[in-house]
Image (cartoon, helix red, strand yellow):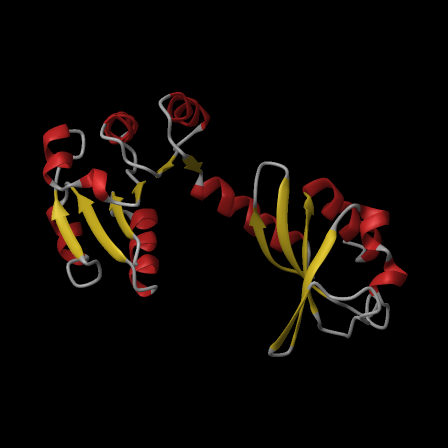
Amino acid sequence: MKKEFAVIGLGRFGGSICRALSEEGMEVMAIDNDEDRVNEFANIASHAVVGDTTDEAVLKSLGIRNFDHVIVAIGENIQASILTTLILKDLGVKNITVKAQNDYHEKVLAKIGADKIVHPERDMGRRIAHNIISNNVLDYLELSDEHSIVEIAADKKLAGNTLINLDIRANYGINIVAIKRNKDIIVSPQAEEAIELNDILIVIGADSDIDRFERKVLNV
C-alpha cells in the first residue's frame, strides 16, 4: 500500500518535500494558510488544501490522524509550528517530522514529542561546507550529530590498493559499505577488492574518524 503523507507549510522546504514525495508516487496532501501557495501545488500533490493548522477542528476535518506521516514545514512562525505539532500529537498522528528554526525551537519540539526534528538550513550548510573543503567528497549525508555517510572519489593515492591493504576499519574506525564503479555498485565489497581510479567509495562512520581519514589519506 502507498503511504499517505501530509505536508504542512509550502515554503521552499515544505514545497521541495511535497514535490519529491509526489514524484515518488506517494499520496500527498499539501496544506498551507496561503491560497496562492496552495494553488501552486494543486497539480503536484494528490490534494492541496487551504487551512489554519493551529485550529484543531481544521486538522480533524482533514482526517489528519489517518496519515502515515505528517511533515510540519512551517516557516518563520515558531508559535504556529509548535501549536500545530502539539495538536498533531494530541490527535494521535503516528509519525511527525518538524522543521526547527533554531536550537530553542528544537528543544520545545522535542519536549512536546516530535518524532524527528530537522534543521534544513543548518544541515545543508554543513553539507556544502564539507564539500567545499574537500574536492574528493562528492556528497555528505548527516545521520546524526556525530555520524555521517560520505561519498569519496578515489584518487591516485587510493587507486591500486585493496581494502585489506588499507585496513581502513582498523586504522580509522570507518567502513566502506559500497563502491560505485561506472554504472555498477559493489555492495559490501570483499577485503581483496582493489580500488580503481575514480571509484566512488561510500563510507560510513563517525565524523571525526571520516575527517581523520580524509586528512591522512587524501591530504585534505
User: Residue at coordinates 56% horizontally, 46% vertically from top-left?
Assistant: 142
Measured as percent of width and height from the top left, residue 187 is found at 66, 66
- List the single residue furthest toward the front: 1
Q: Quadrant of residue 202?
A: bottom right
User: Residue at coordinates 79% horizontally, 50% vertically from top-left?
Assistant: 213
Tally the numbered discs: 0
136 vs 77: above or below:
below
User: Residue at coordinates 82% horizontally, 66% vertically from top-left?
Assistant: 158
Quick one: 11 or 23, which is closer to the camera? 23
Measured as percent of width and height from the top left, residue 212 is found at 78, 46
Quick one: 2 or 103, which is closer to the camera? 2
Q: Quadrant of the N terminus?
A: bottom left
Would residue 54 appear left or right of 115 to someone viewing this image? left
124 vs 115: above or below:
below
Q: Quadrant of residue 165?
A: bottom right
216 vs 73: above or below:
below
- List the single residue furthest toward the bottom: 183
- List the single residue furthest toward the right: 165
Q: Quadrant of residue 18?
A: bottom left
Would residue 147 appear left or right of 81 to someone viewing this image? right
Would residue 107 appear left or right of 21 to someone viewing this image? right
Quick one: 160 or 27, which is closer to the camera? 27
User: Residue at coordinates 37% horizontally, 31% vertically from top-left?
Assistant: 114
Measured as percent of width and height from the top left, residue 57 is found at 10, 31
Measured as percent of width and height from the top left, residue 129 is found at 59, 48
133 vs 34: above or below:
below
